Each structure stands twice: as structure tokens, then as C-alpha cells.
Amino acid sequence: MMIPGRDADRATEQIAEDLRHLSVDQLAERALGGDRGVAKPLVTSDGQVFNLQPALKSRIGKSRRQRKKWQRRASRRKKGSRNRHKANRKASRYQQYEKNVRHDYAHQTSHHLVSNDHYDLYVFEDLKIRNMTKCPKAKRDANGQFLPNGRKAKAGLNRAILSSA
């Protein structure tokens, strides 16, 4: 019987043991760093840039427009009706397409990185996505009126951060 947590711990211990005998310079040669971003989803320390293909980006844009259209149509239909259910199903199908593209991109990128025998250690920054996508705090002036806080721009940035594969 395989227990996922224990097997992963054993594999991690084995990798750590294999790398422990290397000097700092040898370890630096065998390590590859990755920088996550919004415009370019992944840039590695050796200069490789991993990005979605332009055709996939345009399809995702079309998918988002279609999803928005079907969400509007669903909102105009009678609650609990079959037609509203069908419209919601179509909207979710377009959302599923975008999710599948991002998932496929992540698998292809990880396979490309791991298939390179030159590197044994992969280091990625530990981004706190939840903290990065928090809503901006509301600000008030002396009279108690709310001031503009850039929430629309922040919403667009949050969407980009969450959709970067």
C-alpha cells in the first residue's frame, strides 16, 4: 500500500541526500531558478521564457467574451428554468476551456523543464497569491466620503495574476 505523503517524503529525502555531497558551486550549476510573472508566466535563470502561444491567448480571449455573453443571457432568463440552466452550462463550458488550457500549459512547461538532464534542483519563488490579490482598502476623507482607491485597476490586475498559468 502506497501512502502519498510518506512516499513524497522519502523521495525528497533521497534527492536531498544526492545533492548534499555537492559543493556550493556544483549545486549552483545544477540548479535552475524560475521567476513567475503576469506578462510572462515563467522566466528561468538561464534566460528561457515560457509563455502561452498567441493562438491560445486569442482563443482564451474569445472564450472569455463568450462566457460573459452567456452569463448575461442566463441572468435575463427566468430563475429555475431549463433555459437558464442551459445558459449557465454554456458559460461554465467556456470557463472550463480556459482552465484546461492553463493546466495543459503547466504540464507541458514542467515536462520541458524536468526533461533537461542538466538540472537537478528547481527553485521557484514562493508567491503569496492570496495576499497579492486582496481588495484595496476603502479610504475616507475628512467628511467621511469614500475616496477613489483604484479598485477597478486592482480588479484587472487580480484577474491577470489569477489567470497567469
Image (cartoon, rainbow, N blue to C red):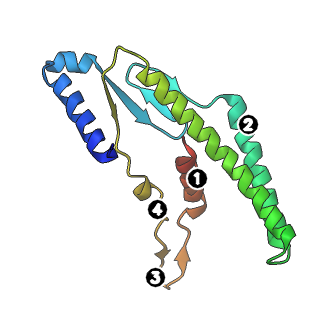
User: Which residue is disc 1 drawn over?
Assistant: 159
Q: Is residue 131 above or below residue 99?
A: below
Q: Earlier in the sequence, mark 1 or mark 4?
A: 4
Q: Which residue is mark 4?
A: 134
Between 70 and 85, the one nearer to me in the picture: 85
Name the residue beneath numbered marker 3. Answer: 142
- State how far apart marks 1 and 2 are (Cα): 16 Å
Q: Amino acid at mark 2?
A: Ser
Disc 4 crowd, CA 10 A, few/some/many (<14, 14-19, 20+): few
Which quadrant of the figure contains the C terminus?
Answer: top right
Instruction: Relative to 137, say whether 41 is above or below.
Output: above
Comparing marks 3 and 2, which lies closer to the viewer? 2
| Three-letter code for the amino acid on which mark 4 is drawn | Lys
Q: Residues within 10 Å of mark 3 (few under 14, many from 20)?
A: few
Residue type at mark 1 is Arg
Q: Residue at position x 87%, y 68% from top?
A: 83
**135 lies above or below 145:** above
Picture residue at 85% right of the left edge, 77% below the top: 78
Q: Are marks 1 and 4 in contact (CB under 8 Å)?
A: no
- Residue 40 visible somewhere in the drawing: no
Indicate the position of residue 14 as horizontal and vertical percent values.
21, 29
Tell me the SS state at disc 4.
Answer: loop
Of callouts 3 and 4, the N-terminal one: 4
